[in-house]
């Protein structure tokens, strides 16, 4: 917690303090996006004729139609069983009738209502069968192979429809291909209340040093007779708003859903790098809104030299009397395209932990802070600086933030 700030964070009390710029609190930036993004299930309908040999057994039905739409009624939602909930175990449960996804956790389809309807030659409804379709994809940011659980449950039958025969397969676009594309072999015959469930496996064949974006595709074959159509009569894709991206650009290949921007979070109360968080909070709260930053692979050394080092027209000068093992911590980060400004243009600040909070002081009497500067150089103990840098490095790998990709930096208490 904040009260456990290290001596290196606190440093000495300056005998002749420069102007105090204020206490640092969590910056009032736009809040992080919802933990899970959502989009409503789309609607559609497909019809096909009934073979003449099967019409008599189906009460004279000449046509079968399959309609898909979001699960909608509140009573149906309230009646969901624990078994149905378990069908979406790999990602957070969303509102029924919606797709939901996170950047690294995967994508779920929760409650696509599918209705099979038999019609007479006069257009009368002879029977219906209703199904609840769910899927739960367990994506991995450290692997290009992942699984998806698929479940179909028959929730209602009427008239000539006594049971439904259901087969299923999946596919995907571009360099992705399923290694096992059927959640169950052949067709499952399901009566009222019965369900079929099984897993499929995907693998991205993305080449080294490249990335690939795609959607997954789903095909369901539904009849109420013993035969299964040769062509699927229900088709849908994962949302275009949530395209999957696999890449082999980092040290370990993996996959994410990049539509949701990555958020790097630092805490002012972190005993390892609270002082660095105070610098970043000051930069974003007092100078300008730096959301988002853009990763600049390979530019860190040159950018840091221009801001803190020998390439700056005003090189950083440590203040060891105030911050033991002092070092220059810059914002925007050297590893961002927004970084690399000449240090002469930066606000030079000294964060000190006093009376249970971080206070920011001007570091130099000859360089007053105007709060119009395009960058900040903070006096931060080297171990805290390195700890903050290590957190950024792990963030890039875990969230698969690729070169030029935007990300946010959030500061919390």
Image (cartoon, helix red, strand yellow):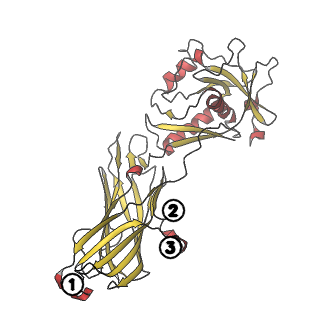
Is residue 233 among the parts visible in the rendering?
no
How many other residues sit within 10 Å of disc 2, few (<14), some (14-19) or many (≥20)?
Answer: some
Q: Which mark is residue 76?
A: 3
- Classify the position of the C terminus by image quarter: top right
Give the CA separation, mark 2 to mark 1.
Answer: 39 Å
How many other residues sit within 10 Å of disc 1, few (<14), some (14-19) or many (≥20)?
Answer: some
Give the CA separation, mark 2 to mark 3.
Answer: 12 Å
Quadrant position of residue 111: bottom left
Q: Earlier in the sequence, mark 2 or mark 3?
A: 3
Q: Nearer the viewer, residue 398 or 170?
A: 170
Q: Position of residue 241 (x, y in %)?
A: 41, 50
**Is 393 located above or below residue 154 in the figure?**
above
How many other residues sit within 10 Å of disc 3, few (<14), some (14-19) or many (≥20)?
Answer: few
| Residue in the image at 47% along x and 33% along y | 295
**Is 351 located above or below residue 67 in the figure?**
above
Query: Which element carries disc 3, helix, strand or loop?
Result: helix
- Whether the residues at callouts 1 and 3 have beta carbons within 8 Å, the answer is no
Quadrant position of residue 212: top left
Q: Position of residue 157 (x, y in %)?
A: 39, 82
Q: Position of residue 163 (x, y in %)?
A: 35, 83
| Residue in the image at 69% along x and 25% along y | 325
- Whether the residues at callouts 2 and 3 have beta carbons within 8 Å, the answer is no
Query: Which element carries disc 1, helix, strand or loop?
Result: helix
Q: Earlier in the sequence, mark 1 or mark 3?
A: 1
Q: Earlier in the sequence, mark 2 or mark 1?
A: 1
Q: Left of 411 or right of it: where is 115? A: left
Q: Which mark is residue 54?
A: 1
The residue at which mark 2 appears reads as: 95
| Residue in the image at 48% along x and 28% along y | 337
Q: Position of residue 242 (x, y in %)?
A: 41, 51
């Amino acid at each position: 917690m904040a009260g456990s700030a290290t001596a290196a964070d606190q440093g000495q009390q300056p005998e002749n303090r420069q102007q105090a710029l204020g206490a640092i609190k969590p910056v009032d930036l736009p809040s992080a996006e919802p933990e899970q993004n959502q989009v409503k299930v789309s609607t559609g309908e497909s019809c096909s004729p009934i073979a003449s040999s099967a019409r008599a057994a189906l009460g004279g039905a000449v046509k079968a139609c399959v309609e898909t739409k979001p699960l909608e009624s509140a009573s149906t939602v309230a009646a969901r069983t624990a078994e149905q909930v378990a069908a979406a175990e790999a990602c957070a449960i969303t509102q029924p009738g919606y797709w939901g996804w996170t950047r690294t956790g995967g994508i779920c389809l929760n409650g696509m209502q599918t209705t099979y309807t038999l019609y007479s030659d006069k257009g009368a409804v002879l029977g219906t069968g209703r199904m609840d379709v769910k899927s739960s994809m367990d994506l991995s940011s450290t692997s290009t192979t992942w699984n998806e659980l698929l479940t179909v449950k028959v929730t209602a039958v009427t008239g000539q429809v006594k049971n439904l025969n259901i087969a299923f397969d999946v596919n995907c676009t571009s360099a992705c291909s399923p290694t096992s594309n059927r959640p169950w072999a052949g067709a499952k015959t399901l009566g009222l209340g019965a369900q079929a469930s099984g897993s499929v496996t995907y693998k991205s064949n993305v080449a080294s040093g490249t990335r690939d974006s795609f959607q997954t595709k789903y095909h369901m074959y539904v009849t109420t007779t013993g035969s299964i159509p040769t062509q699927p009569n229900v088709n849908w894709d994962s949302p275009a708003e949530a395209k999957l991206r696999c890449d082999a650009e980092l040290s370990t290949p993996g996959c994410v859903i990049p539509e949701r921007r990555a958020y790097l979070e630092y805490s002012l109360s972190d005993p390892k790098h609270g002082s660095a968080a105070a610098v970043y909070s000051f930069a974003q709260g007092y100078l300008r809104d730096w959301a988002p930053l853009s990763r600049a692979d390979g530019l860190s050394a040159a950018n840091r030299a221009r801001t803190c080092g020998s390439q700056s027209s005003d090189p950083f000068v440590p203040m060891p009397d105030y911050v033991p093992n002092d070092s220059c911590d810059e914002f925007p980060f050297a590893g961002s395209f927004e970084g690399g400004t000449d240090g002469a243009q930066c606000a030079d600040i000294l964060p000190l932990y006093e009376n249970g909070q971080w206070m920011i002081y001007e570091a130099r009497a000859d360089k007053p802070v105007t709060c119009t500067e395009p960058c900040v150089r903070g006096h931060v103990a080297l171990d805290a600086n390195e700890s903050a840098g290590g957190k950024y490095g792990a963030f890039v790998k875990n969230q698969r933030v690729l070169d030029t990709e935007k990300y946010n930096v959030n500061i919390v208490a």
